[in-house]
Image (cartoon, helix red, strand yellow):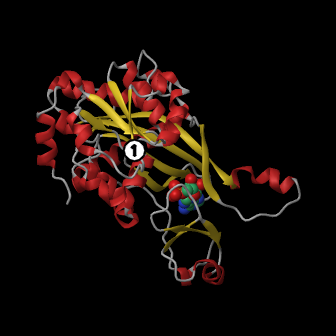
Amino acid sequence: MDVSRKTINELLSGYDKKKLKIATICSHTALQIFHGARQEGIKTIGLCTEKRKKVYEAFPLGCPDEFIIVDDLRNIPADELADQNAILIPHGSLVEYTGDKLNSLRVPMLGNRESLMWEKDRVKMFKWLTEAGIQVPATIDPDKIDRPCVVKHAGAKGGRGYRVVSTPEEFHEHFEGMDVTVQEYLIGVRAYPHYFYSPLTKDGYRAGEGRVELTGIDRRFESNIDEAYRTEKAGLSFTPSFTVVGNELLVLRESLLEDVMEMGKNIVETADKLFGGVPGPFCLETVVDENLQFFAFEISARIVAGTNIYPQGSPYTAYQWEEPMSMGRRIAREIKLAAKAGKMSKIIY
Ligand code: AMP
């Protein structure tokens, strides 16, 4: 059964605010989450398999203070975490592993768990984007494909199994009977801005009750399309694929920041209206076309792996904080701020 806000608030009210801990699954962005918490003086718990533990131990400053070893990362020991005053940080792997069980986890989680349901469902996600006034690629009926389109498997993130098709015949050859979405292929430069929405902070770029911060921008490296020029140069032909392998830093021309900040603000205010907000980190996946127009095809309502590029701060946090500010540290800072102000329920559900 889904856990209510009331239940989470009751759990939170029983927490010892001086002994808060930050917990997450050892995967995705865990190193910077633990590192950032350590910088802010908050103890951490890593949910980990025995096999993976040594990987985290290899990075002492990103290693959790304590491991909870589990056989299967799909099973989050929510009660044990709640007993330890822990706040769970959802990241891409946690969302993927827990699936529909995420809503029933009886442990306080950073952000609004409702927003994770909106990012997951492509119809809802597009409603969120379009109501925020953001341009999106056309969704196309498979039998009406008249231009290059990217075909995406239901729920699949990280690009695995995607393929570009240009005709209905090509679509049916590869995807007959499958649960997929056909999206217009956006031509331009990919830019994935990372944001942090703080309802607790009243200065800066105002959004909703507080402010939206731009923490960084990345571009992903996807196999095999992002090395296509080498493959072609070597005289080989290949079918482009989009499996995410890594991320690289991107800095946009400064005149585009106005659009980037407005998109962030509009996403925040639309989330407030549609489902009670998106406090904490989120990211838009966009393509900027030759007319410098942004088109967004995805939202992540949580920390994204692109933030792993800047554990010591980014070209954007440098102008907001005197100290090196990663997304992991920003999260820990917000939790401290909320605990001090007695406003944890504003940023946790
Ligand atoms: P996603 O699973 O939506 O994050 O997509 C994975 C990757 O596929 C993205 O990082 C893009 O490189 C590519 N992609 C997804 N949708 C589109 C689109 N509409 N046009 C062009 N490329 C796309």
Q: Nearer the viewer, residue 185 or 55?
A: 55
Residue 26 shows up from this direction: yes
Q: Residue at x 57, y 34 (%)?
A: 251
Q: Position of residue 139 (x, y in %)?
A: 48, 71
Residue 186 visible in this rendered orientation of the protein: no
Image: 25 above or below 103: above
Q: Residue at x 89, y 58 (%)?
A: 235
Q: In the image, what residue type sits under mark 1?
A: Val
**In the image, is 308 to the left or to the right of 7?**
right
Give the residue at the far right of this rendering. 235
The one of 198 and 96 positioned closer to us in this rendering? 96
- Could you tell me which quadrant the N terminus lies in? bottom left
Q: Position of residue 75 (x, y in %)?
A: 35, 51
Point 10% across, 41% down: residue: 10
Q: Which residue is mark 1?
A: 70
Image quadrant containing the C terminus: top left
Q: Compared with residue 272, is residue 253 higher up or lower down, i.e. above or below?
A: above
Find ligand 1 in the image and state its quadrant. bottom right
- Ligand 1 closer than 8 Å to the CB at disc 1? no
Name above or below for residue 190 compared with residue 87. Answer: below
Q: Residues within 10 Å of mark 1 (few under 14, many from 20)?
A: some
Which residue does the image show at 66% across and 79% down from the upper left? 170
Q: Is residue 230 left or right of residue 177?
A: right
